[in-house]
Image (spheres, rainbow, N blue to C red):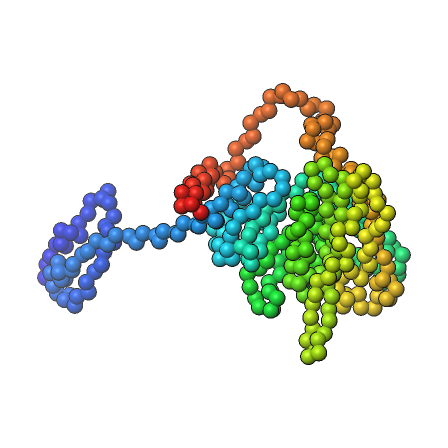
Amino acid sequence: MASSPPPTWLLREANAEPYPLARIETLPVDVDNLASTLDKISVESVEPAKPAKKPSPSANISNVLGLFRLHQQGLLEEGSMKAHLSSAEHVQLWALLWDRYPGLAEWAEYKICYDFDPRTKVLSIRMPTLVHKEFVGSVNKKILSELDRIASSIPATFANMVQEIRCDGSSQFTPRTDEDGKILERLRNKPDSQFRHRKAQFPSVVFEISYSQKRKDLPRLAYDYISKSRGSVSVVVGLDVGYKGGKEATLSVWRPKFWTDEAGELHLTVETTVSNQPYRGGDGAGIPGQLNLQLKDFAPAPLFNGLPTNTQNRPITVTHEYLAQRLTEAEASHDTVEGHEGCTGEHYREKMIVDARPSKPGAEFTSDDDSEIQERQGRGARRGV
């Protein structure tokens, strides 16, 4: 039996466009009359499904994206900048960063010092000055030298315990519990400096540096560090460095205090043990006194098991004179840089032909990204947010 020619709709030129997607109506197939069966198949063109449009970020998120980008470009001034952001928006911000701007996300993660408090819904970007950086570096150096001094004077078995204490700098501090022990949106802080035993969950000693106008934030920060770590942070030291040419500088210290009520419930209180004690006078000279810490402040008690009590009680001190001198040196260094009075390389010239930087393929952040973020900020401003 001669076969019938295929239906005309099956014939296509070799260079013709591909067939549209089709929805085929299933029919019983009569093998002997295949051609007539094919003629009965109804073909319906179907438009390809369009990808779902991603929702636009809120004005608050767009504002923070803009601030992060300005930070990456080096256009934020020294000091502190704050932006409103809810807990949900904080989560959405990071999802958007890693999804669309991974380069900016890495910059924000490792380069930007910012604090986020889900209770107040405030994100604060901190831009440490050269005074901050040099001063806290000097304090870190002094503390580490004191720890080394103790380690070198005790038996090697115990010295290893002390040598496990590290300066973590401004690493992120992110406890996950609130005052009632519930898992909540993480509080995020980056202390100016912190000391943590390598096997500890939290830092044991935290340092925060602030100007006088930011001094009011220190008690809240100290409370957060101590309470959120359930007292694992044993000491918070706040070092005030004066403001706008003022020479007087003070320090404060906060510690956890534990007590048990009549029902046997354990309570934690954050106690101020030193309050705004001057270490440098108005004339810039150091004031007699010292910051008093102990070795046992630098690690949780279980990590010092076996270490003799008299060793755990060894003092670690930083004199007021040392603090005043190092602060004065940091201020002088800052003035040198700001006044363009520092020494430069022998080939340095104000007027010099500088070859163009080779273009880097696959850059994560482009001018189009800038325009998009600026447009989002503009939409937020038009909405009056």
Nearer to me, 331 or 204: 331
Q: Where, by quadrant of the figure, is residue 245 drawn?
A: top right
Nearer to me, 347 or 15: 347
Q: Residue furthest top?
A: 351
Residue 111 visible in the displayed image: no
- How far across and down, in percent of the image, does residue 384 sit? 42, 45
Which quadrant, please, contains the N terminus?
bottom left
Nearer to me, 280 or 379: 280
Q: Residue furthest front?
A: 282
Q: Residue furthest bottom?
A: 263
Nearer to me, 154 or 84: 84
In the displayed structure, would residue 102 be above or below residue 304? above
Residue drawn at point x = 78 percent, y = 37 percent? 329
- How far across and down, in percent of the image, does residue 106 sit? 56, 47
- How far across and down, in percent of the image, does residue 36 sit? 11, 60
- How far across and down, in percent of the image, does residue 93 sit? 49, 51
Residue drawn at point x = 52 percent, y = 33 percent? 359
Residue drawn at point x = 67 percent, y = 59 percent? 223
Q: For this view, does 366 lie left or right of residue 126?
A: left
Residue 228 visible in the displayed image: yes
